[in-house]
Amino acid sequence: MRTIHGVALRLFRDNKFIVFSSVLSIAISTMLVLSMMLFSINAQDTLKNQLKQSYGEMDLSVGFNMNQNETLTPNLIKEISQNKKVNKISKVSISSLNLNKINSEVYTVGVEDDYLAKSRYHFSGNGQ
């Protein structure tokens, strides 16, 4: 009668190449799975850092289209600022200007001089 220990020793003794290649294959596949997991975690962190670098500390931006038939009233601004989930508001005027001489559009922004606008639009000087 054969024991499992005897069968295992015979396998190692007679098929060294198969055992070695199996162990090597398991090690390589484990390293590949780990590297894929680390790559996806790193990619996610890089995306978050790029978004934070592009848009600052702001979580949400709310815009208003002037071509709509609705108006932006002081009551609407008050309702938005009194929402419990809104930490800070900053008034911003965004427009684009078409320059015929250089045949391109210029992105213009008018902002208040506060921390939220500075973190969003990446300027550090204080307005006069």
Image (cartoon, rainbow, N blue to C red):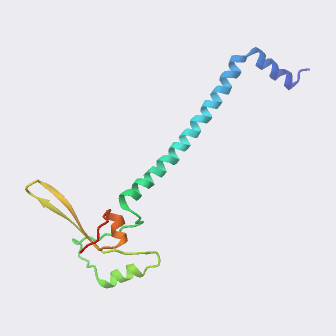
**Tally of numbered discs:** 0
Q: Quadrant of residue 18?
A: top right
Which residue of the protein is positioned furthest toward the bottom in this rendering?
Answer: 75
> Dividing the image into 4 quarters, which one contains the C terminus?
bottom left
Q: Nearer the viewer, residue 48 or 33?
A: 48
Task: Indicate left or right for 3 with 119 as reference.
Answer: right
Q: Picture coordinates of residue 89 (x, y %)?
A: 37, 75
Seen at 81% across and 23% down, the residue is: 8
The answer to whether 119 is drawn above or below residue 19 in the figure is below
Residue reaching furthest left? 101
Q: Horizontal placement of 116 versus 3: left or right?
A: left
> In terms of image quadrants, where is residue 35?
top right
**Quadrant, the N terminus:** top right
Q: Viewed as shown, does residue 98 lie left or right of 56?
A: left
Q: Name the residue rendered at 44%, 75% in the picture.
A: 87
Image location (x, y in percent) of residue 52: 41, 58
Q: Nearer the viewer, residue 88 or 28?
A: 88
Q: Position of residue 82 (x, y in %)?
A: 42, 82
| Residue at the far top in the pictured view | 14
Location of residue 102 in the rendering, given as x and y in whole percent from the top left corner:
10, 53
Q: Is residue 30 left or right of residue 110?
A: right
Q: Is residue 106 above or below residue 1?
A: below
Q: Residue furthest right?
A: 1
**Which residue is at a point 85% across and 25% down the rendered structure image?**
5
Residue drawn at 55 percent across, 43 percent down: 37
